[in-house]
Structure formats: C-alpha cells, structure tokens
Image (tube, helix red, strand yellow):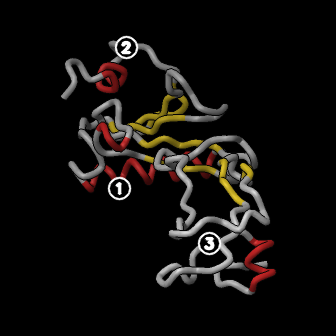
Amino acid sequence: MEDPCPFCEINTGRAPATFVHEWSDAFAIVPLNPVVEGHVLVIPKTHVEDFTTDPEVTAKTYRRAAELGRDLQLQHANAITSKGEHATQSVFHLHVHLVPRTKNDGLALPWYSGKSKKAKPEQEPCGDYPPEIVRDDEGREWETGDCWCTLPKGHEGKHFCGPCTKRHGMPGWSE
C-alpha cells in the first residue's frame, strides 16, 4: 500500500478533492487530470488494492459506477479499472474510471498499442494501392492500402485493403 494512500486520504478528509457523489460505501471524484469533461473516478471507501483483491467490493464499486452513469444520463461511456503498473494502474487503491465518450473524441483505450494489426506476408506488396494513414471513428490511426496480390499459405482470412482485395477477389475483404 502506498504511504499514505491518496484515496484513503481523500476519504478521511485529509486531502482535498472535487466530489461528484458520495454513497455509504463509495465516492466519486473528479480526477486530477480528467481526460475529458465529465471524467470521474468511483472509489470504494474500503481500501482494496485492485479489482482482484476483494470481488465483493469490486462488484459494489462497479454498481456505484453504473448508478452514476445512469444518473448522469451518459449515452456513451467507458467504465475501466486496472490491476498493476503494466496495466496502467498508478494508484494502488481500486478505482473505476467513468469516462464519457463522444464520436471522434480522440481517446484510445488503455490497451490500444498504436501498432498495426495488419498481416505481414513474406512477399512485397504489389504497390497498386500505396500505404496511407487513416483515422477511424474512435480517432485511432491505422495504416491501410498495401495490396498483397498473392496470399502465402496461412494468411487466408486476414485483413487486407478493400480496393485490392475486392479487385483480386481475395479473402478478408468486406463491403
């Protein structure tokens, strides 16, 4: 446990925070660095390190996050928690990020690596459709456009660029 735990300090009134809501078993605050307007943390009053420490506390905390999301009439949102430093946990007291979302808000989920998931056959692309970077509806960047005219064995059903796979009748293309 961190010494002292910042969320325990907030819970006991020894540290400041902007409270959004408080229940008998949890509270919701605005984080120090909200990623969007309306981003809140839902935190159990009982200190548990992460969501695996006490499943009962985790369930109650997520229930509070769901209630708050409903009360705030969130149409699109993520409710996210993490376990461990490599999973982006920075405060080792269970907390659920309730993050309102909008189309093209540019936010990537914590597990979005930014790496292309494109298949890499052992041959060179034909060059009919040179690569270009495109942005999807969630603001993520993807490389597209490589044309693999002949698929080596084992690559059937992988994702390939639409124009070329349609033209060549290759698997992986969809309208």
Q: Residue under circle 2?
A: 15
Image: 162 above or below 103: below
Q: Does residue 19 appear anywhere in the picture?
A: yes
Q: Does residue 73 appear anywhere in the picture?
A: no
Label 2, secondary structure: give it: loop
Front-most of residues 146 and 143: 146
Label 1, secondary structure: give it: helix
> Which amino acid type is marked by label 2?
Ala
Mark closer to the chain start, 1 or 3: 1
Mark 1 and mark 3: Cα distance apart in space: 37 Å
Residue at left 80%, top 72%? Answer: 163
Q: Residue under circle 3?
A: 159
Disc 1 packing (10 Å; few <14; some 14–19; many ≥20)? few
Which quadrant of the figure contains the C terminus?
A: bottom right
Depth check, mark 1 against mark 3: the one in front is 3
Give percent across and percent down for residue 117. 54, 60
Residue at left 35%, top 55%? Answer: 59
Front-most of residues 169 and 42: 169
Mark closer to the chain start, 2 or 3: 2
Label 3, secondary structure: give it: loop
Give percent across and percent down for residue 68. 55, 45
Give percent across and percent down for residue 89. 35, 37
Residue at left 35%, top 31%? Answer: 90
> Which amino acid type is marked by label 1?
Ala
Horizontal side of residue 18 vs 132, given as left or right: left
Residue 59 circle label:
1
Image: 24 above or below 164: above
Disc 3 packing (10 Å; few <14; some 14–19; many ≥20)? some
Depth check, mark 2 against mark 3: the one in front is 3
